[in-house]
Amino acid sequence: MTDSSGQGFPGGARWDAAVASLEGARPRAELRLEPISSPDGLAPNACAFAGDVRPPGHGIDSELGTGRFIVLGDPSMPDAWQGDFRVVCYAQAPLEHDIGSDPLLPEVAWSWLVDALADRQAAHHAASGTATTVLSTGFGGLADQGAGAQIEVRASWSPDDAELGRHLEAWGDFLCRLAGLPPSTDGVSLLAPRRSARGR
């Protein structure tokens, strides 16, 4: 990976400010964030995180919830973005079968994301996404798994400014909510993201 300071791109200082905001974010203590390699070819600048919900007592292999959060930066302001930043993310969590079968669940899950962004004052526009539920029943050698369900929300939106730390915090709140945790304002310091710059 090369440095993603944005030097050589118009608006490089804005990308620097966005990354600094991400590095200063304070997600919930139950959320473990790790910097990961950002996808190639999507934008001149990008950084990404993996998130896992790990409340105290659940151990390192907790499967309460997991997701990815990616920030893209392009000073050319692609028409679809309606701006120079774009957040692309997903979050998923296992559910009880009876909860997963509720036809209103996708709409409720999307409203949780909207609420999380509002609560963190993460101003944005051009939001889009999907909420999907999957029901499963084990048979044969997997019969002991019984019936289960999973919800997955994929979303993207364009932040109104470079205060992207608020968006990362909001996504973390949403992931924890999806995993069944109650609201909380506790947080921990964030590891610096692994960043990339392309198109030099």
Image (spheres, grey):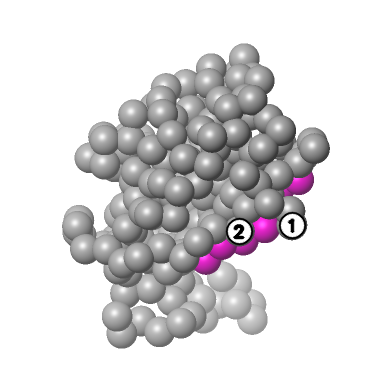
- Residue 110 sits in quarter: top left
Q: Which of 151 and 87 is in front in this view?
A: 87
Q: Is residue 118 left or right of residue 169?
A: left
Could you tell me the amino acid type at mark 2? Arg
| Circle 2 crowding by C-alpha within 10 Å: few under 14, some 14–19, many from 20 | some
Q: Name the residue under label 2.
A: 194
Q: Of the two numbered discs 2 and 1 on the same chain, state the one appearing first in sequence.
A: 1
Q: Residue at x 40, y 84 (%)?
A: 59
Q: Quadrant of the C terminus?
A: top right
Q: Nearer the viewer, residue 107 or 45?
A: 45
Q: Name the residue under label 1.
A: 1
Identify the element where label 1 is drawn. Answer: loop
Judge whether 71 appears above or below 137 on screen.
above
Residue numbers of the magenta segment? 34-40
Percent coordinates x, y for residue 45 in the rendering: 65, 40
Q: In this view, does 42 lie to the left or right of 101?
A: right
